[in-house]
Image (cartoon, rainbow, N blue to C red):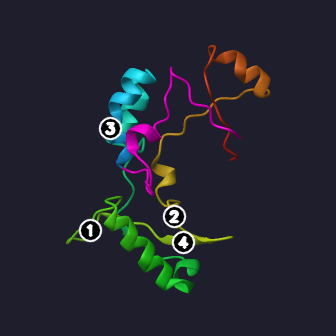
């Protein structure tokens, strides 16, 4: 897929510069681009400035769950991935144990990926749901130039 730059929507890379490895923090630095150039809705601007907040119906029980077997099999990768997340301010180190500690997993594919297992938290979240017949019917629900995607359940 080719990315075409127009005068109307210059690439965000022009605002970030080259060689950006992590997205975290960089999108927030370009909030003016999202406001003035793209005219992003308030919901998107809130995500960029404050991050995504989980829609809790109730808080999960206090817990300290052990890492899954895949994380135990790859301790060096887990250590390096956490160090990289700390270095890039994606996570914060705390002196006191958190209220709820969820297990880590490692997704094994072409490359290893660190995954947090939130199955313990999932029942505590508000579930947004609606039913549609097919994607064609769903496209009629939204206005023109509205984008949507599907996530398998």
Query: Which disc number belongs to residue 80?
Result: none
First in sequence: mark 2 or mark 3? 3
Query: Which disc number belongs to residue 49?
Result: 3
Image height check: is 49 above or below 19?
Answer: above
Mark 4 highlights which residue?
Answer: 105
The residue positioned 42% from the left and 23% from the top of the image is 37
Query: 78 or 19, which lies in front?
Result: 19
Q: Position of residue 22 (x, y in %)?
A: 43, 56
Q: Secondary structure at mark 4?
A: strand
Tell me if I can see residue 101 in this picture.
Answer: yes
Nearer the observer, disc 3 or disc 4?
3
Q: Secondary structure at mark 2?
A: loop
Where are the magenta residues, as a range?
1-24
The residue positioned 34% from the left and 40% from the top of the image is 28
Q: Quadrant of the N terminus?
A: top right
Query: 146 or 32, which lies in front?
Result: 32
Give the crowd class for mark 2: few <14, some 14-19, many >=20 residues within 10 Å. Answer: some
Query: 68 or 26, which lies in front?
Result: 26
First in sequence: mark 1 or mark 2? 1
- Side of 91 where 124 appears, left or right: right
Q: Position of residue 46 (x, y in %)?
A: 36, 33
């Amino acid at each position: 897929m080719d990315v075409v730059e127009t005068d109307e929507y210059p690439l965000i890379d022009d605002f970030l510069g080259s060689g950006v490895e992590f997205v975290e923090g960089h999108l927030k630095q370009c909030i003016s681009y999202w406001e003035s150039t793209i005219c992003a809705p308030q919901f998107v601007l809130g995500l960029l400035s404050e991050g995504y907040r989980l829609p809790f119906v109730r808080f999960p029980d206090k817990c300290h769950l052990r890492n899954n077997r895949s994380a135990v099999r790859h301790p060096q990768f887990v250590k390096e991935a956490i160090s990289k997340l700390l270095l890039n301010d994606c996570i914060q180190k705390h002196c006191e144990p958190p209220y709820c500690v969820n297990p880590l997993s490692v997704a094994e594919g072409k490359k290893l990926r660190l995954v947090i297992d939130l199955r313990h938290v999932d029942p505590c979240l508000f579930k947004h749901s609606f039913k549609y017949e097919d994607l064609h019917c769903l496209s009629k629900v939204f206005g023109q130039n509205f984008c949507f995607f599907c996530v398998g359940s």
